[in-house]
Amino acid sequence: MSRLGQAGVASPDPKLRRIVRSKATPALFDWMVETFNFQGISDGVAASYLETHGGVTWHQIKTEISRDPTCSLLRSYWTFENCRYDKTKRTCSHLRHFSECPVPSHRLRNGRLNQTAFSFFLFVRDVAGSNLFRWFDDQLATTADLGNLSAQESLVGPMRHIFGVSDKVLTMTLSSVLMADWKGRPDWFDVGSQMIVVDRLVHNLLARAGILARFGASHTYGQRCYAENGCADILRQVSAEIDARQFDASFPANFPRYIQHALWHYCAGSGLNVCNGNNIDDRKSCEQISCNVYSICGRNALKYK
């Protein structure tokens, strides 16, 4: 998850910035669908697999779909459901069409990723009219006077039904896209900079430090993190008290995505690697006296013995 966690926060991906400035939907699709490959596995494994076997592109799927596949699931975004393609077992829900179906033809890491790629393509074609940039603009325009959370939901809401992508992955990916061209699309940046993604590392840090308890918000990791007075709510309150311009004068004063990312970076093995289960026995109070916040941390155990 580190590629998703880091992309587009303090240093936007130059390739992504060029894509956003070009307004090329096929290129943006390729970047996003490749990014979806980095969920649920280490960056190194995902990157190595993509380098060896390749991914899947907009133009490949467009060509395959234009050949009028026999499987009825591929007719539209709304009919593409219950595919159940399994790469290992070489099965699906419509086996009589399997040999001619384009979904299994791409050597992605698992069958879920194949389904995600085709579901996402059909979403872009049928819902976004093959123009993600215009669709983003139109969606955000409908919530212009309703606040940032409504703006975020205008994008994440329709896209959460794309097969195989969670709200967390969508939010991280969309945040990177929206923040890629700060100067050219300040309205996009304003929405993306407010997006908060709570993964298990960030949730556990808030629990260990006693922050959740202090807010009367103790809960297990999951959807509760995004509910009222959950992790995301607390991080927004914390961000409002921190002027992010002290870290970079070009930042907005209130930059929740950056604050959330900083906490993630403090914990992640590919970051500072301080507050995580590799270094702390979850059954005990933290004993890392070298930690910068040790003296003010609640040092709560995450699990009972």
Image: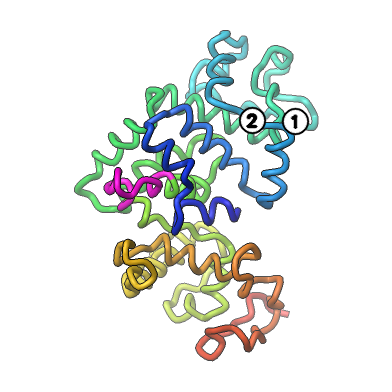
Q: How is the image coloured?
A: rainbow
Queried whether the magenta region covers residue 54, the answer comes back as: no
Circle 1 SS class: loop
Q: Position of residue 130 (x, y in %)?
A: 41, 23
- Answer left or right for 120 relative to 227: right
Q: Could you say which quadrant of the image residue 112 lies in?
A: top right
Marking on residue 46: none
Q: Is residue 83 above or below residue 169?
A: above
The residue positioned 39% from the left and 70% from the top of the image is 247
In the rendered image, the vertical position of residue 244 relative to residue 136, given as above or below? below
Circles 1 and 2: CB atoms closer than 8 Å: yes
Number of on-image labels: 2
Q: Residue at x 67, y 86 (%)?
A: 287
Q: Nearer the viewer, residue 251 or 102?
A: 251
Type of the residue with mark 1: Lys
The region drawn magenta spans 177-190
Q: Earlier in the sequence, mark 1 or mark 2?
A: 1
Q: Is residue 144 above or below residue 161?
A: below
| Marks 1/2: CA–CA distance | 9 Å
Residue 54 percent coordinates (x, y)? 68, 32
Look at 28% across and 34% down and name the residue there: 138
Is residue 187 found inside the magenta-colored segment of the image? yes
Judge whether 152 appears above or below 100 on screen: below
Single out the residue that lies furthest toward the right: 89
Could you tell whether 196 is left or right of 89 in the image? Answer: left
Name the residue that disc number 1 marks.
87
Q: Which residue is mark 2?
A: 114
Quarter of the image with the C terminus is bottom right
